[in-house]
Amino acid sequence: MKRTNGKKSHAVAKAPTGIIGFDEITGGGLPRSRTTLLLGGPGSGKTILSLQFLVHGAQHCKEPGVFVAFEESAKRIVANAESFGWNLDGLRRKKLYFMDAQPLSDMVQSGSFDLSGMLAMLEAQTEAMGAKRIVFDALDVVLALLPDAAAKRREVYRLHEWLLARGLTGLITAKAGGDDVSSFNQQQFGFMQFMVDCAVILNHSVVQGVSQRNLRVQKYRGSSFDENESPFLIGARGLEVDGTRTPDRVIAKVSNERVSSGVKRLDTMLGGGYYRGACVLTTGFPGTAKTTLAGAFAEAACRRGERTLFISFDSDSNEVIRDLASVGIQLGRYVKSGCLRMASARSITGSAETYLVRIKTLATEHRARCLVIDPMSTWSKSGNDSNAHSVAERLTDWSKANGITLVCTSLTDEMAGQAESGTSLQMSTLADTWIQLSYLMQAGERNRGLSIIKSRGTAHSNQVRELILSDSGVTLADTYTAGGEVLMGTLRWEKEGAERVATEVTEVAGKLKRVRLDAEEAELEVRVKSLQVELQAKQVEKALLISTTKVRAGELSRGRAQMEELRGADVAIAGRK
């Protein structure tokens, strides 16, 4: 139920078509028990869409269907649809009925006929099989044979009323003139667009030499729908539509888990690696090692046991494996084990939509958790630029919705300089992490530099590091600056060598000075010990002198006392006399 101007109204019942993306655009499919008009030029896919609508109803919705062919015979239609794997022969026994309704030559000559006889036959057939869906393919072929506009309008209304009275979900196809389906409005039976409840327009055009197909829902009574053009592709299973973003689209889950980039020092610069399910963009000029970084990530993912899909647009898969082995990245063993699937996109021709559908199909079949595309900038050459950017945007949304970590490379536009946002795809606005690779030319050398321009949701290094490729693998050198300039390669080696020599000279001078100081210290220590011995001797001599002086003074004192005693005795004797 939904409200309109404060009043309750019943939502339009939908009949799902089973067409990827189309049911999302229409909010569930075509209007059930109502009539839909499908317009398109030659080769736009009208018959395929109609058949797919019937097949899905018969196989998955328990709704048998009828296909009325006004232009081609039923036998040819079934034969042409065999490549889609729908098993039409099996469905024709009970669930699908094909009616050949091509006008006979005598009808063409007389110009007087109507659809009443055919509708009577169809009524018996639909009742017998319990049909719920019906397709009138190329109705314009019959209408063109009627003598005037009034007769054409009469038969169209007859058909429309017949469909409504029986509650059938009807789909009428008609050709539009040339590549411009808007010319259908100028045709004398263009009133059909106003009569039906739903109108869908298919476009098939060539842009910059590339075939492109677009679909647009022109009207849908009683239901909201996406009014913008949506590219579609005729794939191995029928039509596949890539719808634009809608407000009710499921928001992808956000993970705080980190996955390694395959280069330890880059993981450190990123604060632990890429986020799981993030979109990572590596940009740079040719030869800056974009493919190498992508291969390092793929190897790290396979080492963790995560199924990975590697799409290469520049080289054959075997060439990529051989080239990456020269820098210690061994992908061949993971290809043999089935963990890694390598695919070369050189064999894929067509629009960017073709690339998108094929990549999504391969990733789904491989059950990939990690996806590498090298380089995505190739898409800008596949038709108009705005369409290529839209494809890149939808691939990013799809990978995030499925929890797939997407790592893609992009060739920097040489005319736009180092700013990748100047390229047609503008992937830098979509990426969660943007790594820029560049050349630094010094002293006749070209060295590779790596910097992280942005990494959403995490602190990251702002330094420019030298990217070093060797037989043992990929690594990043510590930042080395001199005079405010980052030095790499030979200049860095020479500067580091000069600094080492200067350091060694300083160390030798320091050692010599320490030896001299040690000698002087030892000499002083000897002198100090000699003085200490001399001091001790003086102290002993002094003590001896003091002791001797005391002894002599005592002896003198005792001698004087004895003398006095003797003298006293003499005095006493003298007194007695």
Image (spheres, rainbow, N blue to C red):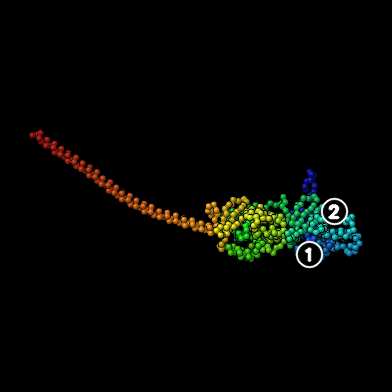
Q: Amino acid at mark 2?
A: Phe
Residue lying at the far left of the rendered structure: 577
Q: Assign a secondary structure to mark 1.
A: helix
Identify the residue at the far front of this view.
Answer: 444
Q: Looking at this view, is 556 or 485 the one in front?
A: 485
Q: Rounded to the nearest whole Å, what is the CA distance between mark 1 and mark 2?
A: 31 Å
As rendered, which of 552 and 510 lies closer to the eye?
A: 510
Task: Specify the quadrant that holds the C terminus.
Answer: top left
Q: Position of residue 391 (x, y in %)?
A: 70, 56
Identify the image quadrant of residue 331.
bottom right
- Mark identifier at residue 374: none
Residue 151 in which image quadrant: bottom right
Residue beneath label 1, please? 80
Kind of residue at disc 1: Asn
Query: Would residue 457 be visible to someone looking at this image?
Result: yes
Task: State the image coordinates of residue 522 (x, y, percent, origin top left).
Answer: 35, 53
Question: Which of the marked residues, 1 or 2, is nearer the chain's N terminus?
Answer: 1
Side (left or right) of 517 relative to 346: left
Q: Nearer the viewer, mark 1 or mark 2?
A: 2
Residue 484 relative to residue 406: left or right: left
Q: Which residue is mark 2?
A: 191
